Amino acid sequence: MEKPLTELKLGKEATIVAVRGGRGMQARLRNMGLVEGQVIRKLSALAWRGPVVVVAKRTQIAIGHGMASRILVRCKDGEDSGNAQKP
Amino acid sequence: MLKNLERRSRKSLLSDILLVGQPNVGKSVLFSHLTGVRTIASNYPGTTVSYAMGKMRSGGVNFTVVDAPGTYSLEPLDQASRVAVDLIDDAQRIINVVDSTHLERHLPLTLELIAQKKSLLIALNMSDEARHKGIGIDAEKLSAELGVPVVPIVAPSGEGVKKLIDTCLSLPPAGQKITNESGHPGHHPHIQHRPSDMRKSASTEHIHLDRDRIWRRVGDLVEKVQTLKVHHHTFADRLEDISIHPLWGSVFALIVITFSFSLIRLIGEFLISGGIGIAGQPWVELPFGTELLFEKALQPQLMQLSRVLAPGSFLHRLLIGTLVDGQIDFMQSFGILTSGIFIPLGVVLPYLISFYFVLSLLEDSGYLPRLAVFLDSFMHRIGLHGYAIIPTLLGLGCNVPGIMATRILEGKRQRFITATLISISVPCAALQAMIIGLVGSRGLGPVLQVYGTLFVVWLLISLVLRFTAKGFRPELLVEIPPYRLPTGRALVAKMWMRISSFVREALPIIVGAILAVNILYQLDVFAYLARFAEPVVTRLWGMPPESVVPLLVGILRKDVALGMFAPLQLTAKQLVIGSVVLSMFFPCIATFVVLFRELGIKDGLKSLGLMLIAVFLTGSTLNLIL
């Protein structure tokens, strides 16, 4: 199931499938290695639309909420698919 | 203005050796090791925002070494990395500094550099940390794959650096362009294995390779040269988990902030008065501190000098100042040898030492990016993002490096807002030391009023700018470095740099300002100025007309300017208004220059206009409500 990174559950692994953003945003994410196909694990998400923290290539990266909501991820082997229906 | 800076860098910065790498890989540490030039190195991405240049001697020849700001790619996205990309064009040889513990993140830049056909070698830094974490990298294999030399090093201890330099100097300088692949000097026989896609567009100046391909190629490379052992959870890992946890992380952040400010106060007060305590009466008082030193060692001598010079004479006024109840008062007398020395060395220096000690701890541990993460949603509401807290914190030490550090922020708008906020509402450590010393003598309440007002001003201006400043609003995106234990040597070196620059640069200005003010007093210039400023200073702000003098001196140095309120017998309310107005009114000359250089004339003027409006409104409001 595909969903925005902001809706991925904490601690879950997922693969980035698309980045819905302009060239600048794409470039910044690419610099961090956040490209399509990259596997990430969500470590933390802060309250009040705070940043999402993920681990990718053994490095922690904090992503602003707006940007995280435009990164689409696919969960591994559907274990998380039930939650995708929830808002 | 910034264009000028860049042009200058292009003309004069033909470096023999340029250190290039992604942010936070330890370029500055290696640079200091090579050249002996001290630089500020920390544990967060974006410590170096400009280049540093130094000389290295090897085999009787001098080489120019340049330390570039970190950049993720040759396609710069912020001001700091733009500087780096410009430097690369003019470099003879490049040392690409790479973090061994995260090879796969750093190789993309390496591949871009290789594609530019630069005379290049790779320094695998932090190879000790990699070993420790069970990460093995086959340097020879990597070198063979990439076709450039690879040398493992540990920059802080200097391990491998000698070999790095020897290898680097054996490379042909960029002037002797390699025309074809096989023409490369014989010791890299595997150069022809370079994949063709890396070569394709090397003729253009800045080539944009297919990024996805780069990441794939990096994946292959890492697979070949790197071995990972199972990594056990360490204490540092656990601390890392806690400090970004949605709930525990906030608690942790609160503890860190409270602890940091308390520690600054504790050390600062101890160095001044020998008292140990955070607010009000200290718990313990020891016979120690600058106050004691000045009273015991200097006071008797100066009193003798005072008798010789005779109070009231011109020279007495200049050197000793005025006596308070027949005695020298180091805060109020205002002669060059009394307040002129006591303010910078007796009051400001102790707080600078303590502030920079705590800031260095925060910087080197790697906590600052985590703090940025926690403040992000709050900062978003005022139109910034979390990383803007780092320039702001630096600004609490000195506005100049704070404003320089806004280069790590993306977008003109965000840089403008952050720099403006720093110059208006962030008091530097020197000024804060005086606020605590002078306003604090009237109790904790007035000090809190000063800080509270400045914070409200900071909030209000950011809100105004949020809705008026044009430009895009970038989001936080930052790599969080691992925690590292700050080493004593690095701490001391960094503090020494920052504090010695205060003594060298600020001390002469303070002494000069007091000299100038005393002479102008004699010439009655100030009486005229006071009459001129009276409508604003007295009617709007409720301050005595003479307080226009400290406000003007504030353009030179804010700490000494605040000190000049001391002899004016102000009420607590006037002292609060005076401190706030002085903090906000006209940045000191050094900040002024940097503000205009970083923002350009147009935005610099906007920033100043905003400052003037804000200071009039704030001063008048305080006069009405306090």
Image: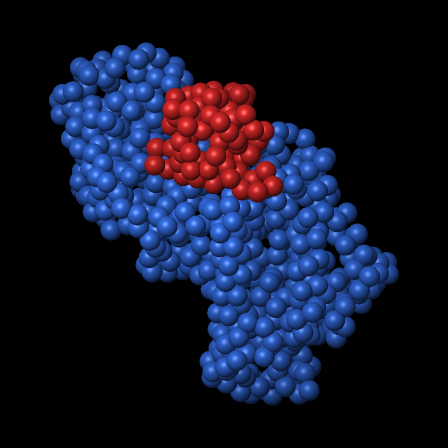
The answer to which image quadrant residue B64 occupies is: top left
Q: In this view, does B156 lie to the left or right of B450?
A: left
Say above or below: B304 vs B137: below
**Residue under the point 70% across and 45% down:** B461
Q: In which quarter of the image is the N terminus of chain B?
A: top right
Q: In this view, does B143 lie to the left or right of B102?
A: left
Foreground of the two, B490 or B445: B445
Vertical relation: B92 (above or below) A45: above
Q: Which residue lies furthest to the front in this view?
A: A82
Colouring style: by chain
**Residue in the image at 33% along x and 57% along y:** B487
Left or right: B361 with respect to B315?
left
Which color has been applied to chain A in this rendered view? Answer: red
Query: Which is more toward the observer, B271 or B132?
Result: B132
- The location of residue B21, given as percent across then percent down, is 35, 34
The correct choice, above or below, for B367 with respect to B302 in the image is: above
Left or right: where does residue B526 sit relative to residue B12?
A: right
The residue depicted at 31 percent of the width and 30 percent of the height is B104
How many numbered dots are placed on residues in this image?
0
Residue B404 placement (x, y as % from top left)? 52, 44
Q: Which chain is blue?
A: B
Task: Identify the image quadrant of residue B126.
Answer: top left
Res B278 visible: yes
Residue B4, placed above or below residue A36: below
Q: Nearer the viewer, residue B472 or A47?
A: A47
Measured from the top left, where is residue B612 in percent x and y?
A: 75, 48
